[in-house]
Image (spheres, rainbow, N blue to C red):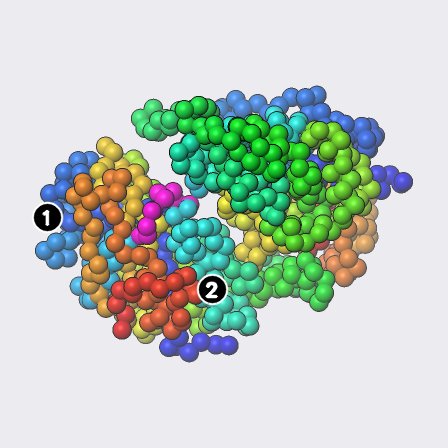
Amino acid sequence: MTHHDDIALMAHLMRRAGFGAGRDELEARVAKGYDATVEELLHPEEHPPVDPYTLLRYQPSSLLPGGVPPMGNVNYMYYLVSTQRPLEEKMALFWHHVFATGNSKVDNYDQLLEQIDLFRERGMGNYKDLLLTISKNPTMIFWLDNNQNHGTEVNENWGRELLELFSLGAGNYTEVDVREASRAFTGWTFGTKIPRLPYGRFPWKFEYRGEDHDDGVKTFLGHTGNFNGEDIINIVVEQPACAKFICRHLYNFFVADEPQVPAWNLEPPRDPAAVEMLTQTFRANKCEMRPVLRALFTSDFFKKARYKHLKSPAEVVVGTLRLTGGYDLPKPGYGQLSMQPSYMGQDLLNPPSVEGWHTGQEWINSGSLMARINFVAEQVGNTNLPGVQAIVDRLKAMGVLEPEQLVDSCLDLLGPVEVGADTKKVLTEQAKQWGQIRWDTPAHVEAATKQTGELLQLIVATREYQFA
Amino acid sequence: MTATEKDPVLVVVQLTGGNDYLNTVIPYNNGLYRDNRNAVSIGDNQIIHLDGTYGFPSYLAPVKQFWDEGKLAIMHGVGYLDSPRSHFRSMDIWHTCEPDKVGTEGWLGRVVREFDPKKENVVTAVSFGPCLFRALSMPGVPVACIAGPLETYGFLPSIQDKAQRLAVLDRFSRMYQPIPGSGVMEYLGTTGLDSLKGADILKVAPGKYKSDVKYPNTSIGRKLKGVAQVHFADLGTRVFYCDHGSFDTHAGQNPIHASLWSDLSQGLDAFMADLRAHQKSDNVIVLIFSEFGRRVRDNGSGTDHGAAGVTFVLGDAVKGGHYGEMPSLDAKKLVQGDLNPNMDFRGIYSTILDKWMRLDPVPIVNGRHEQPQFLN
């Protein structure tokens, strides 16, 4: 492989396993090696976590934001943009897509952020442990009404979603299984919520109330016993459908866009062999996520899947802010930035429903496309931002640039971005309008810098740039 | 496709955050109003009487004029069964008409699809707000979403140089040519060109607009002016949408509510005057709604989330008056401390769809609901 291929592959890995990386970082990672980089990503503990007290210093009300959307988003966005543990954060976002829990009902960002923290801590650990933890997560219990699920009166909301959206997928259980699973989770509730005023909100705590638990015999997926919630989870993770469901989620999130989740029992995966390989790895490793992620990121199907995934709004915004730099502290104005994904159709910590967001093509509508392009173009057109300045500096170091060279170099430094011949033609026409780019006098530098910014804006406006 | 002047137009004003019904349409003779509102009641000398029962706070004075003219319908006790008291869920229900499950299609998205099934006019719906409200969202239905000033609406407003921006947009349109059969790339191409076309159509509106009416320089004032500009340009826009807020007055309610409603009243005053001065008011009605009303008893400085609320419809074609009645303030009649809704919001939508837009309301609001007769 040439150096350029190495950079392109590393850029792909960092876009998917993180939120992209600037050229300096990519070069350092190429020097370190692909497999070594994957290992580093899989072991986030080698790098420090985000310091929440920086939030306290710059945006005090975002530390425990209660029910206020901009502040809840500031907190999450700060982690996404400034993390030194990109895969840990990306996996937390992955689980947020799967275990989609929203402020629309929870009305408490403190609890939602605590749930994201749980995904950070356990997202690359054991799926079975994670499922048990989320079953005891008060935010999830409230979101899916398990606090209303009583021994004397069963509420099926949690039991159903556990099977349909969190583990097996539609078509892999019966209505009786839903009922029996729900019975097993009766008595799983949380401590009484004390009203928010006058002293603020009290954290919610899991509580198991034996007197509210239905201790009778249940028959669930062919097993019979006096099951409690733990038993249900033990049975669920042994189902072949479970491994396949989680691995298809991983494929959709990290590799290439799949149909929407409700269609999964109707439409086969676009790459059945890839999902099967991941599924076997998952089962062989008894639900450990790390070996599955390692197998995924080092596979050929992953390496060949460049630009097969439409960026989610979170990926657009975080990727842009990490590329342009200048946002490493949650300074004033961060609230506006942190709401950007919601303008593009992804209100973080507030998915439209427990089904989560519809991904891929469904991210795009006229308003969201405009919001994406305008936001990214405004950022990359600001040549004062350090990441954009770094691109200008690299171009400057190349000396005199012909129009074709300027286009190729800008595409390269922004990604490398791969564009079709028609797009390339239009970009080159734009560059030809300026002629040769020179950096020998202050006037030339000023013009060349401005033109670079404009070309970057045109590149991020392309259809191709909407993909990762 | 161009609209004739007689095509009915709907302007929706969304009061985000939960407008306090009881301090908007005040039952000033009802002792329970004062009993429950130690901190946030409106003083007698600040109430303008509509009749012997209800009054507006004085900061709704411009709206009172519409009432006097018989052009304002006040819909009482609006909501739906088992109101969840969550802003977002409630708003979703108002947007999708789906109280029992999470809907994905907005009621106005369906309206736009009915009006323009072949997508011949990408500005059939124009929204002034930060995002595509779910009321308007529907796969394959284009909506022009204008977050900032109309003058700068479109792709790449950050490019200052006009000629340069035009050149870039020309290149943009060539880069977005949808190649049939190219899947997502084709969809991106269509969407990109639709939005570009919409921006092209809309940008003529401010230039064509001439008016002596001065709008207040407030967020809602600017939005309503944008609505007037696009409406006057005869671009075939049938649905306009604006949001205004936040009405989530848990604390320090009185000054916030006063300032929000002053802005809105003055904006509506200018808007109606503008429409009338240009003979453009006969085919426009304005629907003003909020996702819920607020709790009957105040919390010492504000009010918490409630259930039933008030909805207004304003316009020269509207039959003014009270519709329905205010739910009882009697403690025994309240539901968890809130007014119990007695008019379904989908009935109001149905009247608008049936009597104004001339569409079958049933598939749009998901069922049949009693229609308050505020339109002929």
Residue range (magenta): B79-88
Does label 1 lie on the same chain as label 2? yes
Subunit that carries the residue with mark 2 = B
Using the image, determine if residue A37 lies above or below residue B337: above
Q: In the image, residue A335 lies at what x, y percent?
A: 49, 37
Asked if one can make out residue B159 in the rendered structure from this viewpoint, the answer is no
Give the labeled residue for mark 2.
Answer: B110
Residue A460 image point, x, y percent: 67, 50
Q: Is residue B18 left or right of residue B131?
A: left
Position of B368 with respect to B52 (left or right) is right
Tell me where residue A107 sits by quadrant: top left
Q: From mark 2 to mark 1, how far is it between C-alphas?
A: 42 Å
The quarter holding residue B94 reads bottom left
- Chain letter for mark 1: B
Mark 2 nearby-residue class (10 Å; few <14, some 14–19, many ≥20): many
State the residue at coordinates (25%, 58%): B75
Q: Nearer the viewer, residue A368 or A17?
A: A17
Where is mark 1, residue-wise?
Answer: B29
**Amino acid marked by disc 2:** Arg
Helix, strand or loop for disc 2: helix
Chain-order first, disc 2 or disc 1: 1
Report x, y in % for residue A66: 42, 31
x 65%, y 21%: residue: A48
Q: Residue at x 44, y 71 (%)?
A: B233
Task: Bin the neighbour count of mark 1 within 10 Å (Cα to Cα): few under 14, some 14-19, many 20 and up.
Answer: few
Question: Is residue B81 found inside the magenta-colored segment of the image?
Answer: yes
Q: Nearer the viewer, mark 2 or mark 1?
A: 2
The quarter of the picture where the C terminus of chain B appears is bottom left
Looking at the picture, how far across and down is residue A228, in whole percent? 52, 28
Location of residue A336 with respect to B153 vertically, above or below = above
Any magenta on residue B80? Answer: yes
Amino acid type, callout 1: Asn
